[in-house]
Image (spheres, rainbow, N blue to C red):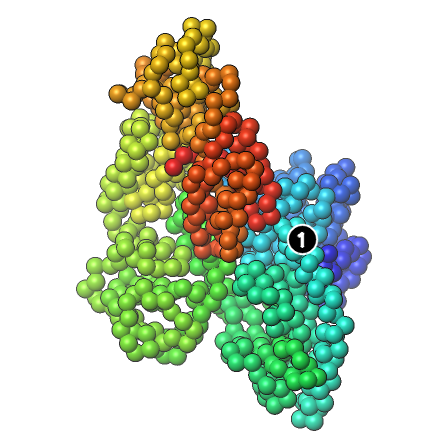
Amino acid sequence: MPQTAFECLELEEMVARLAKYHPADDAHLVEKAYHFAREAHEGQVRNSGEPYFSHTAHVASILTELMLDARTIAAGLLHDTVEDCEGITIEVINREFGDDIAQMVDGVTKLGRLDFSDREEQQAESLRKMILAMGKDIRVVLIKLADRLHNMRTLSFKPRDRQVAIARETLDIYAPIAHRLGVYTIKQEIEDLALRYIDPEIYHEIARKVGMKRVEREAQIATVIGTLSGKLEEMGVKNFSIEGRPKHLYSIYRKMVIQNIHFEEIYDLIAVRVLVDSVPECYTVLGAVHTLWNQVPGRFKDYISMPKNNMYQSIHTTLIGGRSIPTPFEVQIRTYEMHRVAEYGIAAHWKYKEGGNSGELDKKLYWLRQILDWQSETRDSKEFMDGLKTDLFSEEVFIFTPKGDIINMQRGATPLDFAYRVHSQVGNSCVGAKVNGKLVPLDTELETGDRVEILTSSSSKGPSLDWLNVVKTQQAKAKIRQFFKKELHGENVQKGRDILEHEAKRRGVKLGDLTKAEYIEPILKRYTFADAEALYAAVGYGGLTSAYVISRLIEEQNKAEKAQAPQKAPTLPEPSQVMRQGKPTHGIYVEGGAGMLVRFGHCCNPVPGDEIIGYITRGRGVTVHKADCVNAITAESERMVQVSWADSEVGLFNASIKVTAYDHPGLLGEITVFISDMGTPVTAASAKLNKNGTCDIHLVVQVNSKEQLRQAVSRLQKRTDVLEAYRSAGQ
């Protein structure tokens, strides 16, 4: 396990640390929260067998290491009381500790008590709530990161499937957030811990290889430090510090797996960090290292002149040292203040901010404002999650305005994204763009160093819906949707209604039957729509997908019908002896229809072991559906017929499986062979690469029973590169 950067402190040590970095803060508040939380969690035990309060104490200790204020530490001690302790509400926290702390606790409290259709929706809405809370007070997410760090440290006490699920969520969401906030101290540890549980074999292999080269690496680092120290003293540089920089295992893993390079090809396994007092001294040091050693072409980055969005500033250069240092090595150069920010990121500002939002800090958090902007326009949970992951994972490019100002944008951004980044009106009135003085198409991908000029026209009629396919940033998409939402409300309402009618017809249902008040009201309430027109408009401008809305309406209709007439639930008569007379067709007995043509519905692909129902089609015999298939549930009752499976094995049946996995070369082939080796033939396979580095794989397999299908899915779920696997509807 990686060495931990934080330890658990007793109350006295916690208060003493707070007094050291913030002597004027209210230590009594921390003491009160400590005793309150310990009493509230009395009798609760974690999976490890430790008292539950030990978790909150660890979280508070981490927050003191980040040098956060007393109110944040108190909120860290209290963060689980509302969720896990009977009788403790946000109102109680507000009364005892004030509104500031209550808001932070509320921001990190999960939404587990609310009713959502699936786990993905629950996770999406929990994250949406956390991001909204971040917009009000960034300390919310710092508490959440400290909470996640300690949970990752104690993950060994969870069942294997939960270990993998939590580790993947950590890599997908929390590590990128820590990166965006510049809190590398936490980011690196949770990444290493996540890798340990997702792929323990490669984790231990990398750790072994790093350990094997430790003596050689340390000797070379000592040579670099000795040589560079002598040179800087000779040049008169004062108060410098040089030390070896540890390489965390996950960064090595990313280079090996994602960039497809060998361990021996990784340049920065040997690395040193130089700290000085001022920016001019940083460039003096840079000159010194380039004098001493040869620079590796293409391996120089100046994040001082062009800082990252997460406030990170440093100079990185990779060098070749000759015979004494045969391996290429990296040197990082920064000031002591830059180093503090590099380690603690946004947390470093809270030592002085005490809750306010400075103009400088607000600029650094522009990416957060972007997410806040587009999430309010995105109602669909899946779209929100995909957009969030894209924004968090995206690399940056540095674009110049005509005046020479630098604007950070995600890689892949287009001139149209740039236009909307400047201002909504600039984007809406855009008629063209110049990059480096030349006219270019609006979908041109921008690169670092490009100078972009947006051409506008006062006579422009506004954006085109096609622009949603041109822009790459969620912010631009949100602003385009906002235009259509405001300017074309009536058209959106009609368009949304038409789209929903088409989707309903495709599902074999009528929209009018689904939009009764009792069916549509829960959806309106869920998304705070004033009326059905607002819902139609949201579908019209792209805020909600038609498939999602129709699915939820059918779900609400089924709930209502079951509640009103439980006796009419799918209770077809038990198969009679008469029904079982004669030979089955394709393993299916049809009541009163011996010898009838039998086919299986591609919408649900039933297999032996599923509850099934038959539907008499016009001229095509009987179509067999799963009893819970939407097409069966909504079909005309007079055309339903009782069917049952034959008692004996009758061959193989098609079934569909959806797999989401981390993408890597040969993934589709590996999954296909893996399934086939189980005795489950694959008849069709397709794959779609996602922007976040994952891949969606759709498989059609042949099985002889529901149990065989279940076993295949279960084995897929246990693969370390698989995020999720489940039986899906037919294609």
* Furthest-left residue in this view: 459
Q: Which residue is more in the foreground, 268 or 304?
A: 268
**Residue 436 falls in which quadrant of the image?**
bottom left
**Residue at image point 79% right, 59% down:** 13
* Residue 68: percent from left, percent from top: 66, 61
Q: Which residue is more in the foreground, 242 or 650?
A: 650
Q: Residue 633: in sight, yes or no?
A: no
The answer to whether residue 402 is left or right of residue 691 is left
| For residue 15, above or below residue 491 | below
Q: Which residue is more in the foreground, 654 or 176?
A: 654
For the C terminus, the image quarter is: top left
Circle 1 residues within 10 Å: few <14, some 14–19, many ≥20 = few
For the N terminus, the image quarter is: bottom right
**Residue 23 falls in which quadrant of the image?**
bottom right
| For residue 101, above or below residue 574 | below
The answer to whether residue 102 is left or right of residue 382 is right
Q: Mark 1 highlights which residue? A: 201
* Residue 581: percent from left, percent from top: 43, 8
Q: Residue 594: in sight, yes or no?
A: yes
**Residue at image point 56% right, 70% down:** 312
**Residue 623 falls in which quadrant of the image?**
top left
The amino acid pointed to by label 1 is Glu
**Residue at image point 67% right, 93% down:** 235
**Residue at image point 32% right, 14% down:** 638
* Residue 93: percent from left, percent from top: 64, 45
Q: Secondary structure at mark 1?
A: helix
* Residue 404: percent from left, percent from top: 39, 79
| For residue 728, above or below residue 350 | above
